[in-house]
């Protein structure tokens, strides 16, 4: 079992009563880069309950995106299994909607067409699609941008469209790969708040990759801190603070200090590795 | 916006017309000096006069024969330009129409690529002009060999760019589409094809340029109408003014085709980042 550290309080979070939805068992992922074999993930065991908001936290190269991609079905693990609702994941699917850091909107489609795309694939009727798209555009404050192309939108607006596009699918699970990483601090906070609002309203399971400690504390029910190469679970931290969370509250800062220490240990190993690889060249 | 402004400001207009005006003046001086035989180099005035005559109807207006508008358009030049344009459009449609599906299949499927690539690599370096003897042997004279040659000229640029376009589709779109549940057909029609359009249209533009070159050459050899035919015919009468008038007409038609293609590109790629218009 993974070590469990109840940092803030030892009370049982509500989500613990919910059934396990994503189950990761003995997952290992290796890549070969030339003659080198890189162990991106090793011995990952993780249970995520229905409705939980879980952040994967760690420095670059800790395998957090690799783990997310394994759950998404883009990169099947070398060893071990990922199951969702008891079903083993072998390929991507609309039951696990993904939001990418680089937005991945289709630039040849307007905002409304991007949001409608997944629904058209599902074979929904035109009227149903129009209604649902309208609802989502309203929800993400995109109604004035429906006929714009992505190139004419700011980064924050693009990410709203990407979120609307995934929400359209009404998938029980949202996978988010550093979705706000490229945004400025204020836009980032706005979108974090909107994501929380939507999450509380529609009750999805969210697996959210980030390297921002503050972001993870602000958002998550649970933070999984990962180690740098091989990627393993270093700590499983439950954040039991009422939302909206105050970034200046003492308990927020205490947790931030603890997490910083953990992440910086891994960051140092990452930096040393980088320096080594440069001097080796 | 600012670019358009500077282009049409009086100073810019003056600067832009300086060199052409100087060339025409020099040309006029040379041809009226008596140093050069007017058959070798007709004066610009003679060329413009000939161009005007070439444009105008050849017969007097007769209300009993045809409507006014048909008469006004009955000049030799308009007929020639229309003949050439018709061949370009038809030949391009055939060539690009065959290249597009093959290019999509070759770009999207390595097995199809492996099957067709050797043949394409052997055929591609053969200039369309080299097909002329075969085209005449197969199709005789007339529109058929011309369209065949133009189709070959348009085929390879469109094919190569379509293959490149499909292969350069950013993987992130494919991942996003798979995540949204897209099957193979949806992926192809709604993701790969639109993502490849910038490449495909660049190929189409090169292809129509090639088609325009080939139409002039093929009209000099295989057909009895069109702008290419007309300037070769003028040479037989030593009408150098008409040759030059015809050459300018070819230039104007080429420019018009290019502008039309550009407009179409800008419309189809209005979503595309970094498009300058």
Image (cartoon, rainbow, N blue to C red):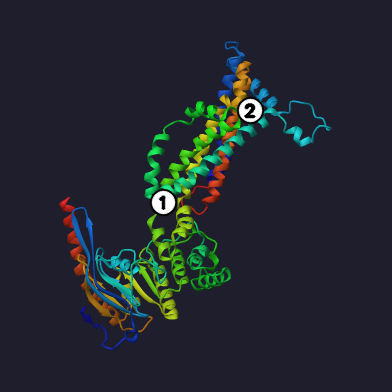
- Height in image: A137 above or below A253? above
**First-in-chain label (1 vs 2):** 1
Residues A167 and A57: in front is: A167
Q: Residue furthest top?
A: B35
Residues B258 and B147: in front is: B147
- A24 lies left or right of A188: left
Which SS class for mark 2? loop
- B75 lies left or right of A196: right
Answer few, some or many: residues within 10 Å of disc 2's Cα (few below 14, many 20 plus, some between 14 and 19). Answer: many
**Where does residue B125 sit, x and y in percent of width and height?**
41, 33
Numbered label attached to residue B225: 2
Q: CA distance from mark 1 to mark 2?
A: 41 Å
Can residue B15 be seen here? The reply is no
Residue B238 position by quadrant: top right
- A214 lies left or right of B271: left
Which residue is label 1 attached to?
B108
Can residue A51 be seen here? The reply is yes
Residues B27 and A220: in front is: A220
Residue A77 position by quadrant: bottom left
Which SS class for mark 1? helix
Is the same chain shared between marks 1 and 2? yes
**Where does residue A18 sit, x and y in percent of width and height?**
35, 85
**Where does residue B86 sit, x and y in percent of width and height?**
62, 36
**Where does residue B4 sit, x and y in percent of width and height?**
56, 44
Residues B208 and A76: in front is: A76
Chain that bears disc 1: B
């Amino acid at each position: 079992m993974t070590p469990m550290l109840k940092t803030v309080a030892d009370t049982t979070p509500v989500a613990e009563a919910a059934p396990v939805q994503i189950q990761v068992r003995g997952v290992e992922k290796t890549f070969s880069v030339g003659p080198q074999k890189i162990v991106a993930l090793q011995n990952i065991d993780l249970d995520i309950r229905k409705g939980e908001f879980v952040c994967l936290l760690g420095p670059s190269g800790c395998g957090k995106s690799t783990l997310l991609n394994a759950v998404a079905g883009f990169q099947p693990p070398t060893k071990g299994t990922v199951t969702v609702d008891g079903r083993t994941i072998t390929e991507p699917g609309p039951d696990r909607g993904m939001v990418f850091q680089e937005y991945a909107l289709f630039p040849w489609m307007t905002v409304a067409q991007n949001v409608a795309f997944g629904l058209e694939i599902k074979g929904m009727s035109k009227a149903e699609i129009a209604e649902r798209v309208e609802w989502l555009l309203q929800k993400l404050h995109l109604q004035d941008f429906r006929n714009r192309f992505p190139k004419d939108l700011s980064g924050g607006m693009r990410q709203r469209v990407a979120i609307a596009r995934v929400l359209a699918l009404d998938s029980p699970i949202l996978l988010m790969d550093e979705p706000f990483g490229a945004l400025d601090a204020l836009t980032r906070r706005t979108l974090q708040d909107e994501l929380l609002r939507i999450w509380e309203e529609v009750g999805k399971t969210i697996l959210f990759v980030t390297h921002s400690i503050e972001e993870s504390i602000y958002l998550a029910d649970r933070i999984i801190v990962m180690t740098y190469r091989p990627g393993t679970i270093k700590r499983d931290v439950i954040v039991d603070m009422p939302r909206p969370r105050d970034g200046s509250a003492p308990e927020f800062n205490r947790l931030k200090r603890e997490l910083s220490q953990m992440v910086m240990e891994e960051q140092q190993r990452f930096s040393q590795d980088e320096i080594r690889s440069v001097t080796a060249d | 916006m600012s670019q358009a402004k500077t282009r049409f400001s009086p100073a810019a207009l003056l600067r832009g017309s300086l060199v052409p005006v100087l060339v025409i003046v020099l040309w006029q001086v040379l041809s009226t000096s008596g140093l050069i035989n007017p058959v070798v180099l007709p004066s610009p005035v003679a060329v413009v006069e000939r161009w005007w005559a070439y444009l105008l109807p050849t017969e007097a207006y007769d209300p009993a024969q045809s409507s006014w508008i048909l008469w006004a358009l009955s000049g030799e030049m308009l007929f020639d330009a229309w003949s050439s344009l018709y061949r370009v459009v038809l030949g391009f449609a055939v060539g690009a129409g065959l290249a597009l599906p093959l290019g999509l299949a070759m770009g999207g499927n390595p097995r199809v690529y492996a099957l067709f690539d050797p043949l394409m690599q052997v055929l591609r370096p053969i200039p369309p002009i080299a097909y002329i003897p075969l085209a005449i042997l197969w199709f005789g004279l007339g529109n058929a060999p011309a369209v065949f040659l133009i189709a070959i000229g348009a085929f390879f640029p469109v094919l190569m760019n379509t293959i490149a376009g499909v292969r350069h589709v950013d993987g992130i779109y494919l991942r996003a589409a798979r995540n949204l549940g897209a099957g193979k057909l949806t992926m192809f029609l709604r993701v790969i094809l639109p993502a490849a359009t910038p490449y495909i249209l660049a190929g189409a533009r090169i292809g129509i340029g090639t088609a325009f070159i080939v139409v002039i050459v093929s009209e000099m050899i295989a057909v009895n109408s069109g702008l290419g035919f007309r300037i070769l015919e003028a040479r037989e009468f030593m009408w150098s003014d008409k040759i030059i008038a015809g050459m300018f007409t070819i230039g104007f038609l080429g420019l018009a085709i290019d502008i039309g293609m550009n407009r179409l590109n800008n419309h189809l790629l209005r979503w595309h980042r970094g498009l300058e218009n």
